Image (cartoon, grey):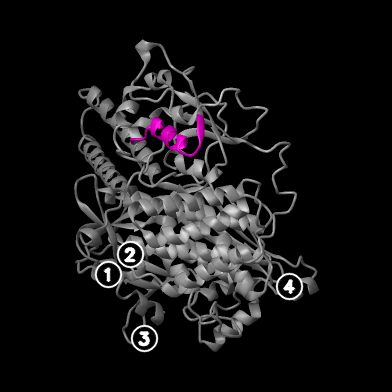
């Protein structure tokens, strides 16, 4: 059996388990972790160990085994996890990420990091195992357990994953004396019974000195496909009859009641086990729930398959637009049914488009989840006390946008801690709480999402920013507003840091943040009050697959201007256009300001078709500067499906992508930021 086809699933689930471990450790450190948090962390590590051993990733399995040993001591109450232990465990999480990446991409293992983490864990294990505080230790049993009571209720879909309950019962019988009681109360009438579904459940009593972890190992493959409860078995509650070791396998009636797939699969050694062990970090509890409860209906689908589906729906939208355009001249009286059908097709197509697009939508929590650890580490390095608050984590955004927004957010959060928040002494002197607060929030607003990074620190210093801008020769408007002053921090090379550190002060960052956000079709702005704090607000489209655009005619062709960068359009008088000294370009006077004027036809090697008509200009904003684009005509506004031109052809300066219009023509989407003469014109203005 070729198990390499399960590698992708293993790596994905392992990343989820590593994230669960990290979140649990941070919760424990902050005192927010509940009694079951250490169990969640242990099960996550255990799942990674089981999967890595199955696939032959021995470096991961060996390291996780060491980590699991320490976690087992903490879980059993033999060891307290103080701040130094949690720091070592968090370092181990980083090492696990490194090992996982090495296994996935074939990279070399960072042996120095691996040995350092192993040494840290071994030092903890070799030291005194201080018991957990009494408050978190399990209540002492009134009598010594004589074994374990196990309530095992498989989900109906268990057989479809190739797992066999009888095999698990046989493995349990090898651990000690086993008494088995089969529950068939969920069986439907014979006429309704599906032999490919698991209907039986088991009450099990396992006698002897058996470790709980050994029982959990037995059910590790199916813990996300069953209701499982493992409780200490006391002499006062155990059944009078004890099954002899020789007959510890399920009784004949129980075996006979097993559906055919279970019996068949029991003859093969793990015919098709779940490839990665449990997906959930902790076993499900609550065996008292009905065993017929439906299983989780989520499935894991490769992103390229979703993208292919979205592309096909995009083609359908284009085809529908073509049909609508070509039927526009039909006589409604003669073609009433046809036109009604086309209207219904239009509604269905848009509903389908929205439904398919929602498949790519993920909660912003996928981006926010990495910041608790990052904030902890940066605050520790800077000697600051920082509280991270998040809100709106459930707000959904396109997966592609989430992946590309992470780096800008990382920079903004680092800036908030390093530049924004004062030291503890400064905060106390200012009458503030000694711990600063950094907030991450997300919310929908129309067809966009607003993500904000805020801090309650010192705020921006207007005079310091103006002085730094003058020092670096950055142009400043006359009598600038606060918003215009804050906008100066996005200038390339701008920094107000007094000293260069490994976190900031090199003048590289905020300009890149703005550029990356604008590449996503978004905008960024800053609000700040000195002494109270700063907020950086990012406005993003919900998806990059569909674009609201303004269609313009240029040299006999149609171009699309992203609507989010369009400020206004106007008919231009000849006297409003001035030539820059030296003939390097033109500028357009818009009210009291002059902005660079660019002829789109000349940019794309086309001949303008304006005749003697007055020029038409569309004023757009790109990279914090306004630019006027001269076009032949304004055609309207419409939503277009974006096609990746670079993937299908090659990258072209000034073109962000393409779309297909209702009449079948291809229209290019203008990328103002990369127009060849944009930078030169901006300098000339």
Residue to which mark 3 is pinned: 581
In the rendered structure, are the residues bearing label 2 and label 4 in contact, judged by CB atoms less than 8 Å apart? no
Residue 373 is situated, as x and y percent measured from the top left of the image, at 56, 62
Residue 388 is situated, as x and y percent measured from the top left of the image, at 63, 60
Residue to which mark 1 is pinned: 653
Element at label 4 = helix
Residue 443 visible in image: no
Q: Nearer the viewer, mark 3 or mark 4?
A: 4
Q: Is 156 within the magenta? A: no
In space, the residues marked 1 and 3 are separated at their CA atoms by 26 Å
Task: Name the N-terminal-most of marks 2 and 3.
Answer: 3
Residue 193 visible in image: yes
In space, the residues marked 2 and 1 are separated at their CA atoms by 8 Å
Q: Decide which of 57, 416 is in the foreground and name it.
A: 57
**What is the magenta range?**
162-178
Element at label 2 = loop
Element at label 3 = loop
Residue to which mark 2 is pinned: 671
To which quarter of the image does residue 357 belong?
top left
Residue at image position (56%, 34%) is 207
Q: Is 169 within the magenta? A: yes
Task: Name the N-terminal-most of marks 1 and 3.
Answer: 3
In space, the residues marked 3 and 4 are separated at their CA atoms by 54 Å
| Left or right of residue 468, residue 549 in this image | left
| Left or right of residue 61, residue 642 in this image | left
Number of marks drawn? 4
In the rendered structure, are the residues bearing label 2 and label 1 in contact, judged by CB atoms less than 8 Å apart? yes
Relative to residue 536, is residue 224 depicted above or below?
above
In space, the residues marked 2 and 3 are separated at their CA atoms by 27 Å
Element at label 1 = loop
């Amino acid at each position: 059996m070729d198990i390499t086809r399960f590698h992708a699933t293993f790596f994905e689930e392992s990343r989820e388990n590593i994230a669960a471990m990290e979140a649990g450790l941070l919760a424990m450190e902050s005192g927010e972790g509940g009694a079951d948090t250490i169990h969640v962390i242990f099960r996550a590590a255990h799942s990674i160990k089981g999967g890595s051993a199955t696939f032959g990733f021995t470096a991961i399995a060996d390291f996780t085994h060491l980590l699991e040993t320490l976690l087992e001591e903490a879980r059993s109450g033999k060891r307290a996890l103080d701040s130094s232990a949690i720091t070592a465990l968090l370092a181990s999480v980083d090492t696990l990420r490194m090992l996982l990446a090495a296994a996935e991409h074939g990279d070399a293992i960072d042996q120095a990091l691996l040995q350092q983490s192993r040494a840290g864990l071994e030092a903890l294990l070799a030291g005194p195992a201080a018991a957990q505080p009494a408050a978190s230790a399990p209540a002492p049993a009134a009598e010594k357990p004589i074994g374990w009571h196990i309530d095992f209720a498989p989900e109906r879909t268990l057989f479809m994953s190739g797992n066999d309950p009888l095999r698990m019962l046989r493995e349990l019988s090898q651990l000690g004396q086993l008494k088995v009681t089969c529950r068939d109360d969920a069986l439907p009438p014979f006429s309704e019974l599906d032999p490919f579904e698991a209907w039986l459940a088991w009450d099990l009593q396992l006698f002897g000195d058996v470790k709980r972890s050994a029982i959990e190992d037995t059910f590790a493959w199916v813990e996300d496909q069953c209701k499982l409860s493992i409780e200490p078995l006391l002499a006062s509650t155990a059944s009078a009859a004890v099954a002899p070791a020789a007959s510890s396998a399920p009784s004949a009636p129980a075996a006979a009641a097993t559906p055919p797939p279970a019996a068949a699969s029991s003859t093969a050694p793990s015919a098709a086990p779940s490839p990665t062990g449990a997906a959930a970090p902790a076993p499900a509890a609550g065996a008292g729930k009905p065993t017929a409860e439906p299983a989780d209906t989520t499935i894991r689908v490769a992103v390229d398959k979703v993208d292919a589906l979205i592309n096909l729906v995009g083609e359908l939208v284009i085809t529908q637009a073509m049909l609508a355009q070509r039927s526009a001249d039909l006589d409604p009286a003669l073609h009433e049914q046809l036109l009604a059908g086309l209207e219904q097709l239009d509604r269905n197509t848009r509903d389908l488009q929205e439904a398919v697009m929602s498949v790519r939508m993920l909660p912003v929590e996928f981006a926010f989840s990495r910041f608790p650890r990052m904030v902890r580490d940066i605050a520790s390095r800077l000697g600051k006390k920082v509280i991270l608050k998040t809100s709106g984590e459930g707000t959904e955004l396109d997966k592609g946008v989430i992946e590309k927004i992470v780096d800008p957010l990382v920079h903004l959060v680092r800036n908030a801690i390093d530049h924004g928040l004062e030291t503890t002494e400064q905060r106390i002197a200012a009458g503030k709480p000694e711990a600063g607060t950094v907030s991450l929030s997300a919310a929908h607003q129309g067809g966009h999402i607003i993500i904000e990074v805020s801090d309650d620190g010192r705020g921006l210093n207007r005079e310091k920013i103006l002085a730094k801008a003058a020092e670096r020769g950055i142009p400043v408007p006359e009598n600038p507003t606060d918003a215009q002053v804050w906008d100066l921090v996005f200038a390339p090379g701008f920094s107000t840091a007094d000293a260069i550190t490994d976190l900031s002060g090199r003048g590289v960052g905020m300009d890149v943040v703005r550029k990356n956000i604008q590449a996503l079709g978004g905008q960024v702005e800053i609000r700040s009050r000195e002494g109270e704090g700063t907020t950086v607000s990012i406005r993003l489209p919900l998806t990059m697959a569909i674009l609201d655009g303004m269609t313009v005619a240029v040299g006999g062709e149609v171009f699309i201007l992203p609507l989010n960068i369009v400020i206004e359009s106007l008919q231009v008088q000849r006297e409003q256009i001035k030539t820059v000294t030296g003939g390097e370009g033109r500028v357009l006077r818009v009210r009291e300001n002059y902005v660079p004027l660019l002829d789109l036809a000349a940019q794309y090697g086309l001949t303008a078709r304006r005749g003697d008509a007055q020029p038409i200009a569309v004023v757009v904003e790109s990279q914090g500067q306004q630019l006027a684009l001269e076009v032949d005509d304004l055609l309207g506004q419409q939503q277009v499906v974006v096609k990746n031109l670079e993937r299908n052809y090659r990258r072209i300066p000034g073109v962000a992508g393409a779309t297909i219009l209702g009449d079948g023509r291809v229209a290019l989407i203008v990328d103002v930021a990369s127009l060849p003469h944009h930078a030169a014109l901006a300098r000339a203005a």
